[in-house]
Amino acid sequence: RSPPWRQVHNEICSLYIVPLYNDAFWATASREGIFEIKGREKDTEELDYERVGEIYRTFFNLLKEKSSAFKTNIAKQEFQTADYKSRYNMKLSSPNQRICTN
């Protein structure tokens, strides 16, 4: 969970991500999306929250960009759309709204 002085910037949490074949990195999830940050400073062990690169809408999109193994394996997955409105008798914002599941 992000400390209070980061929550005022709409940040939710920071994660240390270790992809299978790529270098590990730090990312911060916020209300705007998820983005890579500089991470821990070696001399002080403090997190440097400065953003590196772009903001991704989802964690899924960030992993596809940062991890070659994730991108390769997710391309092999079969996905189907589920009509949750009829399945769970939910009211969705659009009559044609669908959610991608695997």
Image (cartoon, rainbow, N blue to C red):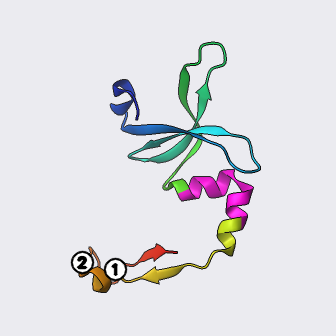
SS of the residue at dot 2? loop
Determine which residue is flagged by label 1.
84
The answer to whether the residue labelled 1 contacts the one labelled 2, judged by CB atoms less than 8 Å apart, is yes
Residue drawn at x 64%, y 58% as measured from the top left: 64
Looking at the image, tell me whether mark 1 or mark 2 is earlier in sequence order: 1
Residue 25 lies, with reference to residue 62, above or below; the image says: above
- The extreme bottom residue here reads 86
Residue 67 lies, with reference to residue 85, above or below; the image says: above
**Could you say where residue 82 lies in the image, as x and y percent from the top left?**
42, 82
Kind of residue indicated by mark 1: Tyr
If the image is split into quadrants, where does the N terminus sit? top left
SS of the residue at dot 1? helix
Work out how far the residue at label 1 is from the one at label 2, CA to CA, in angstroms: 7 Å
The answer to whether residue 13 is seen in the rendering is yes
- The extreme right residue here reads 21
**Could you say where residue 79 lies in the image, as x and y percent from the top left?**
55, 78
Check residue 65 for magenta coloring: yes
Residue drawn at x 46%, y 81% as measured from the top left: 81
Kind of residue indicated by mark 2: Met
Q: Which mark is residue 90?
A: 2
- Neighbor class of circle 2 (other Cα within 10 Å; few <14, some 14-19, many 20+) is few
Could you tell whether 97 is left or right of 75 in the image? Answer: left
* Stretch in magenta: 60-72
Check residue 32 for magenta coloring: no
The total number of labels drawn is 2
- The extreme top residue here reads 43
In front here: 93 or 4?
Answer: 4
